[in-house]
Image (tube, rainbow, N blue to C red):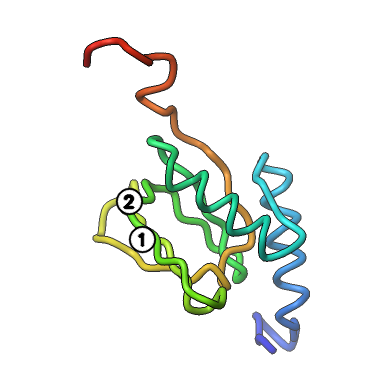
Amino acid sequence: MFRARGSLTLTSSKLLRDARARALKAGCQSWRNETELREALEKAFDYRGDVTLTQKDGTTIEGYIFDRVNGNALSTSFVRILPKSGGGRLKIAYSEIAALAFTGRDPAAGRAGKPG
C-alpha cells in the first residue's frame, strides 16, 4: 500500500491500473500476461530507437534498451536502458514494467541493404 499526499491511501493495484491507463492514452503497449510482456520487451531490445517504459509506480523512462536478462520469473528478468536524459545506465525488472512505447525513430528502418 502506498501513501500519497494528505490522507489519501492508494493500493498498488490502483497505482498499476492508473499507470496502465496513462500509458495507453499515450499510445503505449500493455499486455495481459507474462508471455506478452516478454515478447514486447524482446521486440524493444531488437528495436534500435528509443522506447519509453512506464513503471508500475507511474514513472516513465525514455531511452535505449541495450541489454536484457531473461530469468525464470519476471522479478529475475531485467532490461538495461540508457536514459535519454543521461545519468547512467538503469536496470529495471520486468515485474516493475506496466507499459512500453516505441517513441524514437529506428535509425536503420528502411535501410536494408544500403551502406551506412
* Residue drawn where x is 58% and y is 58% of the image: 38
* Residue drawn where x is 74% and y is 86% of the image: 9
Real-space CA distance between mark 2 and mark 1, rounded to the nearest whole angstrom? 6 Å
Camera-side residue of 36 and 54: 36
Q: Which mark is residue 66?
A: 2
Camera-side residue of 75 and 86: 75
x, y percent for residue 54: 57, 58
Compared across the picture, whether 101 is left or right of 49 comes to right
x, y percent for residue 81: 36, 56
Compared across the picture, whether 60 is left or right of 49 comes to right
- Secondary structure under tag 2 reads strand
Q: Write down the quadrant of residue 90 in the picture.
A: bottom left
Q: Write down the quadrant of residue 105 in the picture.
A: top left
- Badge 2: residue crowd in 10 Å (few <14, some 14–19, many ≥20): some
Q: Write down the quadrant of residue 91 in the picture.
A: bottom left
* Residue drawn where x is 43% and y is 21% of the image: 109
Q: Which mark is residue 5?
A: none
Kind of residue at badge 2: Phe
Kind of residue at badge 1: Arg
The reply to whether discs 2 and 1 touch (Cβ–Cβ < 8 Å) is: yes
- Residue for badge 1: 80
x, y percent for residue 103: 51, 37
* Residue drawn where x is 66% and y is 87% of the image: 3
Q: Quick check: 46 above or below 32?
A: above
The quarter in which the N terminus is drawn is: bottom right
Q: Quick check: 55 above or below 112?
A: below
- Secondary structure under tag 1 reads strand
